[in-house]
Structure formats: structure tokens, C-alpha cells
Amino acid sequence: MPDKEDIKSVDPATLEMLEKAAQDGCSTAFDRAARMSPCPIGATGNCCSICGMGPCRVPLAKGKEETAEEKKKRRGVCGATAETIAARNFVRMIAAGTAAHGDHGRVMAKLFLDVAQGKAPGYQIKDEQKLLQLALDLGVTIGDRSNEEIAVDCAKLLMAEFGKQEGELLFLKRAPIKRQELWRKLGIAPRGVDIEVTEAMHRTHMGTDQDYKDLLNFGSKVSLADGWGGSMVGTEVQDIIFGTPAPVLSQINLGVLKEDEVNVIIHGHEPQLAEMMAIASRDPELIAYAKTKGAKGINLAGMCCTANEMLMRHGVPIAGNFLQQELAIVTGALEAIVVDVQCIMQGLADTANCYHTKVITTDPRAKIQGAVHMPFDEHHGLESATAIIRAAVDNYPNRRGNVRIPSQKTDMIAGFSHETINYLLGGMFRASYRPLNDNIINGRIRGVAGVVGCNNPRTTHDAADLIMVKELIKNDVLVLQTGCMAMASAKAGLMVPEAAEFAGEGLRSVCEAVGIPPVLHVGACIDNSRILIAATAMVKEGGLGDDISDLPVAGAAPEWMAEKAIAIGQYFVASGVYTVFGTTFPTLGSKEASEFLFKDMEQMYGGMWAFENDPLKAAHLMIDHIDKKRKALGIDKSRERILYDMAMRRDLEAV
Ligand code: BF8
């Protein structure tokens, strides 16, 4: 792994724009990270700031074994131990991540209701099949009712999931039966979304839950309200009203910006505005208006997870991932960066001051000092989007001349929803995961890994992702990706079928037969719920055990930074997946809390956390875990026997 001091990014476009930012006297997150070291006490979970008696700092003495007497003294004013403090902080991160995804899911459920009731013109029910499947899952009567009538009932049930006070989240029933029973036995089957977040804040309030194991087990309950709750509601509804993603060709990196067009980037997470922006940007009247300002057209691109949503459904190109948001402005060619919620740096406003870019906030929950606020109203979606694009067009003549757009843009294929994977593997008439399971059992595919999450300027931008993903596919592990890590791989050319050349012989032969890349783009971070559904489909298909924890699969977030990533990691672990994080880990200041997450959880959930900062070693931890599961399933021998002769190749192509 390159030394963080030596190299800020492995992406040439990013390096070029960092150089330009320095020339232009404009600072970025990379500079701020270099100026400010992370607080060593807070970074390891040893700082408790939840009451006015502190903040209390209880760092581990470096380099020597602690005596029992010393440990007794290492407490907060209230007597809280290092493990309680680390666990409380960790659970609060899970709660914040769950709240973010939950609030997104809630907005989508409300929009779904509005669409069904005809109150949101411009939106419609696009995926009837998915609506009907949802109705079946939720027990909503189909009969000869209209899609809208069915959708109203579904939307009301989904909205109620957020405020539900008792019982269980409805989507838990989608998990393997054995997993559901385990959650019930351990008391971690979530009742609703909001109630678990609220209880997390209560339990972690001064003087409430002070047993770190109990706290961390409760953290699992909260996280499940994200993965099998808020996030799953979000993905489900978005597919129904915006369309379920199918394979689509597009491009990625700052080179997608155009020198002679009005460039507009949409950045954030909730796609309802972006959907309307996609329509407005193609409006002949607006394009003609842009021409009156001297531009040749309007170029819409995405950033972060809104970008993933737009890419998956419309092929809208991606300008970059999390750490490239300020750099898009540094090109000098960006008329507007239009933001909704989450992962939006406040630094955008400062960067924009160096150039002509307008930062436009659109959501009442996310305003930024120095930005222009143009509220987006779903009930008049197209009008709102049109006004925003018009403002961007009006800004085109204000470009200051120091325009430099990096040349880098890479082809990529996205759109691998669960339904698409099912169809691609099984064919139109027998859509199924059987070919995937068969190829895992016969050893051509060793296992499946989800590599997800953010960028973090504390580590070389995109580097850990590329090292990890390349090592995994080289070892015949099929990789599923979401969020900013999906973008890192796409920029490096790993999301086209030709990338199969980097895969091991077995994985390569499957990719070539099916025509898919060895690294599949599954969507935005909220779409990690698709990975849960895919894992469940593998269990239900048979031959690989009867729970997610039996599968030869693993997860990772090598460059994470957001609280949402911790929530995602915890719901993967509580769903039975071995999950490795890199860069930093927020409980390392407590041996007990870390051991509970890294070891004890495996006994409880069959999945556990690991921390490994070296992405190559982390990849091998994942491969070792996959091999351990293969052995337990009795399919380790089949891997050793593979010899690919022509007959086997023909056999595979016939699948
Ligand atoms: O939700 S991967 S930096 S953009 S948090 Fe944010 Fe992290 Fe990117 Fe999407 Ni996910």
C-alpha cells in the first residue's frame, strides 16, 4: 500500500486537480487532512463526551501490559470503563448511520404514497413486477385492483415500518428462516426503524446501559433496522417508482465534464430530484436557452451515491467519488453542484469561492452557509429541476477562464440489481441463482465478496480498493460493489467484461461465458440491501448451507469514513457475514470491546468484524474465511480438482 505521505491518490485525474487547486490557491479535504491529525484518543473510541462532567479521556497506556490496578483507574468521572465508552460511541455511530438511511427510506416511502395517490406528477410506477412481488411479500391483496390501489396499501405499510412500536420489521421475513430464528433468540429482531434509533440514544445516554456486551448486541438490533429496514425500503421503493436497474454502459471520472457545455453535477443520496434533473437537462427549451448563453448543450453528471442511482437507472456519467467533490469545482468548468443529503462537504462552499461554481442546496434538512438554497418540491418536481438547471445555465457566462478538465474517463457497465443477476445467470425463462451456486460448488468461483464504502483522506484515495479487489478477483472471488468503492474500481477499468483478464482462471471462464465483468456494480450505499437479498437467494437456491453465515462470502470497507459504513458493517456481521474494515477502527482503544466485535460475535452471529489496514492482507483474510466456509460445506476438494479442458469450457458455455 503506498505511503499516505507519498501519494494522495492513485487516480491521475485527482492528482492533476490537486495540483491545479494548489496553483489556484484553493484548499481541499486533502490539504485539511494533512494539516489536522486525527485526535488519537477519539479515533480509538476512548473519549466520552456524552455529558457535562467530561469529556473524559481514557486512552490505553502505549506499549505496556496494563495491570488490574491501572485498569481500575482508567475510568470516566461516572466510573464508565473504556469498554463501555467505546461501545457507547460505536452504538451511536450505528444509530446515526441507521437514522441517515432510515430517513432516506422514509422520504421514498412517502413519495411512493404520493405517486400512488397521483400527488406527484412526473413520477410513476415503473416496475409493475416488483410492485406485485412487494405486495405478495407484504400480504397486500392484488386481485383485480389497479397498480395504484395496490401501491397505496404497500406504501402505507412501509411508512408504518418507521414508527412501529412492537412486533418485527416486515422485511425480516425475507431472510433465511434460520437467521430469523437466531435474531429472535438473541432478542435483536428490530421492532421498527425509529424506535431502535431512539432506544440506542437512550441506552447510550449517561447512566443507562453500562454493559458493553449488551450495548454492542443492541447495536446489532439497530443496524438490522437499517439493512433489513430503512435501506431495504429505500431500494425497494426506488426500484418501483424509478425502475429496477438493468445493465447500462456509461463513463466515469472528471473527464466526463465538457468544456463547451453547461456542466451540472448532482451530488448526495436521494434520487427524487436527480430523476427530474435528468428529464430537465434533456428539455429542448433549456438546451436552446443554454445555446443563447454560448454553450453547446447541458451536461449532467453525478457524484457520490446520487450518481450511482442515476448511473444505474439512466446511464448518467459519474464525475467522481467522495474525495473528488471539491475537485470537480477545481476544473473551473462546473456551473452548479446541486446537492441533496449526506456526504456533502461544507468545504464545497469555500472551493466554489475560488471559481464561479454555484453550490445549490435543495433539501430542507441540509443547508450550507454560503450556498444558494433552491428547495426541491416533489409535488412540482419538474418545475423545481427546471429552475435549478436554468440557474446553472445563467452561470455559464461567469466562467473565469482557468478551465482545465482532466482527460480521464473510463467506460463502465453498471446496473447489476439482484433481479438482473438472477436473469443474467439463469436466462429469461429460468432466472435463478443456480448457475452461481453450481459454479461456487464446482470451484470455478471460490466465493463472493462485497467491497463497499467510502474514500477517506487518511489513506491514499482509491488505492486500498484497487489492491483488495484485484487480489480478490485474481483468486476467483466474484466482487459485488456499491458506493464510492464501486466508483474506484470503475475508474480503474474493472467494471467492463474485458476486466475478466485480471481474474483467476475459474472466475474468468464464468465471466466470459455469462458476459459479465468480474466486479459488479450493485448500486448506492443504500443498495447494500441488494447484497443481503442476493446472499439470501444463494441460501434459498440450495447446496451452500441453510444460512447466510454458511456461505463462502465476505465483506469489506477498506477506505470507510461515514457512520453509515459502521451501520452497514454491523448489519452484515449480524446477518452472518465476516466483515473487514481498513484505515481506522473506532473501538481499538478497548481490548474487550474490540475482542467482542472481532471474536465473540462469530459465536453469536456466525459473522464478525476484523480490522486490517493493509488491503492485501485484508483480501487474504477474506479469502481465508471463504476457504473456511468452503471446507465446512465440504466443497473445498472440488476446487483442488479443477483442470479446465475444452469440454469443461463447452459445458460451462451451455449453462
Ligand atoms: O452512502 S460510500 S462517502 S457517498 S457514505 Fe458517502 Fe461513503 Fe461514498 Fe454514499 Ni456511502
Image: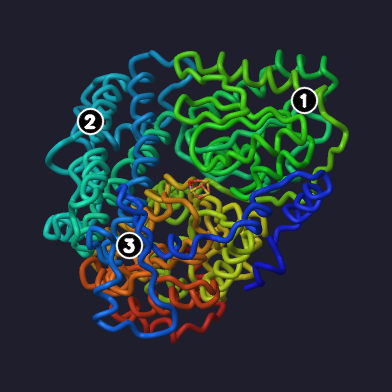
Residue 633 higher or lower than 190, as above or below: below
Q: In the figure, residue 68 lies in which quadrant?
A: bottom left
**Residue marked by disc 1:** 297
Within 10 Å of disc 2 (Cα), the crowding (few <14, some 14-19, many 20+) is some
Give the Cα separation between the discs numbered 3 and 2. 33 Å
Measuring from the top left, give residue 187's x and y in whole percent: 14, 55
In the image, taking residue 127 as reference, residue 52 lies left or right, namely left
Which amino acid, by three-letter code, is at mark 1? Gly
- Marked residue nearer the N-terminal end (3 or 2): 3
Q: Secondary structure at mark 3?
A: helix
Q: Quadrant of the N terminus?
A: bottom right
- Marked residue nearer the N-terminal end (2 or 1): 2
Q: Secondary structure at mark 1?
A: loop
Measuring from the top left, give residue 485's x and y in whole percent: 55, 56
171 or 395, nearer to the observer? 395
Check residue 160 in the rendering and tell me which mark sits there, or answer none.
2
**Nearer mark to the viewer, of 2 and 1:** 2
Which amino acid, by three-letter code, is at mark 3? Ala
**Residue marked by disc 3:** 86
- Marked residue nearer the N-terminal end (3 or 1): 3
Residue occupying image coordinates x 37% and y 49%: 529
**Nearer mark to the viewer, of 3 and 1:** 3
